[in-house]
Image (tube, coloured by chain):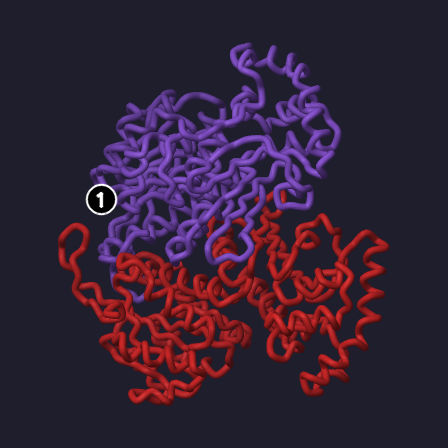
Chain colours: A purple, B red
Amino acid sequence: MANYTRRTRRQLPGGAPSDMQDISIVQLGLGGVGLALLDQFQALPDASRSGLTLTGVADSSAALYRPEGLDGDTLAAAVAMKRARSPLSAHPEHLPAAAIAQAFERGPAIVVDVTASEATMPTLRQAAEAGCGIVLANKRPLCEDSATWRLLTGSGRLRYEATVGAGLPVISTLAYLQRTGDTVLKIEGALSGTLSYLFTRIENGDSFSAALRSAHELNYTEPDPRDDLGGMDVARKALILARTIGIALELSDIAVQALYPPEMARMPVSDFLAQSAKLDQSYQQQRREAAREGKVLRYLAHVEPGNVHIGLAGVPPESPAGSLHGTDNLLVIHTRRYSNPMRIAGPGAGPEVTAAGVLGDILDLAIAMRAQEQGGRCL
Amino acid sequence: MANYTRRTRRQLPGGAPSDMQDISIVQLGLGGVGLALLDQFQALPDASRSGLTLTGVADSSAALYRPEGLDGDTLAAAVAMKRARSPLSAHPEHLPAAAIAQAFERGPAIVVDVTASEATMPTLRQAAEAGCGIVLANKRPLCEDSATWRLLTGSGRLRYEATVGAGLPVISTLAYLQRTGDTVLKIEGALSGTLSYLFTRIENGDSFSAALRSAHELNYTEPDPRDDLGGMDVARKALILARTIGIALELSDIAVQALYPPEMARMPVSDFLAQSAKLDQSYQQQRREAAREGKVLRYLAHVEPGNVHIGLAGVPPESPAGSLHGTDNLLVIHTRRYSNPMRIAGPGAGPEVTAAGVLGDILDLAIAMRAQEQGGRCL
């Protein structure tokens, strides 16, 4: 596992030695996506990983950091620990979590946030202020106030493909459209695989509560399914899409339709699941009303200037959203140049495809940062 | 129109002067896509165009080239000329077409081929051998023999997004999937807007000949519609997709189903259109047979190792290909990591969106070339 060791001076293809400094990668988060990302990084061909050195990893309890690169044994022990659900603080060489910020002072660095936590914000702020690159799968930092959005996006050294649609080419496509002078007019999306699954089950005759229990058992929902049913996860994605196309907005500005009534918000998860049958009749009625108009129910995000909202809507079954099945995500992108909208669909969650979205960002951002060192721009 | 003038020394955001040399852009082709590209390049914000200088343009008759950058008046005259359907050789400052190759010897250059011609191949070969960047909307150079494919792709300084699906993120997505360690198992696609239009009309009850005449009148077909109906344009795209995912193949290896019989291959276009009604009965029968199995007809490309073919197929109307309408293209990408395939759909032709695909490639490639100068890799 020598893959993690640092290479500072290398032979270039042309034969000339390079004084280029390696870009230091530090990773916050060692959950499902974080572990998949370490695997994928390690499996990269040498040519792709060239010039990148993993110097640090952190979870909420502690960090491991070595400026010369984490060696294979240290890292393997950390991975084994996390797979066994121990915190990183159990590793003999652990440092305080904040130690990771040392990386930001020692030449070019990229901090990768694959947590789902607000606790990484101070570290990301430090990274942005030090001019480091930032790659996010974590949606929360991008949903803070507009000033934070400007801080994170201001340097051009931010990538966040995996925040919407996991590994689907969503953010990169919006960036490309705008970079080449197109104007994004409207985005419509099914941005929750969990809710897509739920409503295609209901469409096929299942009750809401049966579909929900099945989604919960298959681990399609969060441990507390209200985290999906409340719509806030979709709202965060919609906010990220909106801000990406230049709509100034705060999370609190978005109208979000929750799929359970307020009185069910605080009960224990088991009670919530047991009592969800109370909602069956209402969803059956909504399904029938939609069917009477030849429509099916989908939980959709609608993003256009002056009109960003999230909620249940009836759509024609032959429409892109109506023909979705399973847990797929869908983005429909209307632009000035495209007569018909562009559609991107496919699995929008899962550790492997999410990690690939993050890894793609790291590789792209490293190239952009190198180009910027040359005096070029960093998109 | 000072936008085209060269800027060699600039202030960087940090304030330090840069010795970075501008990247010279030379454009082969001044048809619909070429003129749209010049417009879009000129409309780029300064920050995006920074470091790029348009030094040359060429059509099949002649070239304009100035190492310090084409000035606005020269270029405006050339554009007016081409809009009036005059050749570039009518421009007072024109040079022989081959003069464009001077650009390859004077520092970093990108040659952009937006023709549909085989005649650019010697120039592209020179560019590749000189280590220049190459951006193609022209499919033909990528459909030459495998040795030419290796020459063009070998340096990593090639981009060709617009060759398949115009501005849809197809090639970049395949590159991303493979760069992050995924394996593309199979691609299925509706890669001809013209043929999609034809068969959705037939599905809706039109005769083949009526649908064809309508497509011809709307300029959805090539001037000779047999260029679409022969399937070779789709076959070229399939070959490009196959080679992109690592399948070694020649164009002649691909089984292509033509949509007219050999005896109609050589008659004048007007006779062909007039006699196309002879084919109506056969297509009506195929449509009815498909309908009997609950299917609709689509002209599809199928790309997987050992099995690349092009032709008419019956597909379920609710499938991604079956639910296509109008002139849209569709790509369905099956990979090892994606449980369900990724789908990308939308307008796959048109000067504006094709030019945007080319422009996106130019901007990305310029960044990659800058990074490579820094000793980084060029993807």
Q: Is residue A201 above or below residue B327?
A: above
Q: Is residue A85 above or below residue A182?
A: above
Is there any visible trace of residue A215 in the rendered image? yes
Question: What is the three-letter code of the residue carrying label 1?
Answer: Gly
| Residue at image location 53% in from the left, 15% down from the top | A262
Q: Is residue A132 left or right of residue A88?
A: left
Q: Nearer the viewer, residue B106 or B153?
A: B106
Residue A293 spot, x, y in % from top left: 71, 37
Residue B180 spot, x, y in % from top left: 47, 49
Quadrant where the N terminus of chain A is found in the figure: top left
Q: Nearer the viewer, residue A176 or B257?
A: A176
Using the rendered view, name the quadrant where residue A246 is placed: top left
Number of numbered discs present? 1
Using the rendered view, name the quadrant where residue A248 is placed: top left
Residue A269 spot, x, y in % from top left: 57, 14
Q: Nearer the viewer, residue B175 or B291?
A: B291
Residue A191 spot, x, y in % from top left: 53, 37
| Residue at image location 77% in from the left, 84% down from the top | B263
Using the rendered view, name the quadrant where residue B307 is placed: bottom right
Q: Is residue A278 above or below residue A316?
A: above
| Residue at image location 74% in from the left, 51% down from the top | B317
Q: Is residue B346 left or right of residue B352?
A: right
Q: Residues within 10 Å of mark 1 (few under 14, many from 20)?
A: few
Q: Nearer the viewer, residue B82 or B147?
A: B82
Please, which chain is the residue tagged with disc 1 on?
Answer: A
| Residue at image location 33% in from the left, 85% down from the top | B99
Is there any visible trace of residue A11 in the rendered image? no
Q: Is residue A275 left or right of residue B210?
A: left
Secondary-structure class at tag 1:
loop
Q: Looking at this view, name the residue that lies furthest to the left.
A: B16
Q: Is residue B48 above or below residue A77?
A: below
The residue that mark 1 highlights is A107
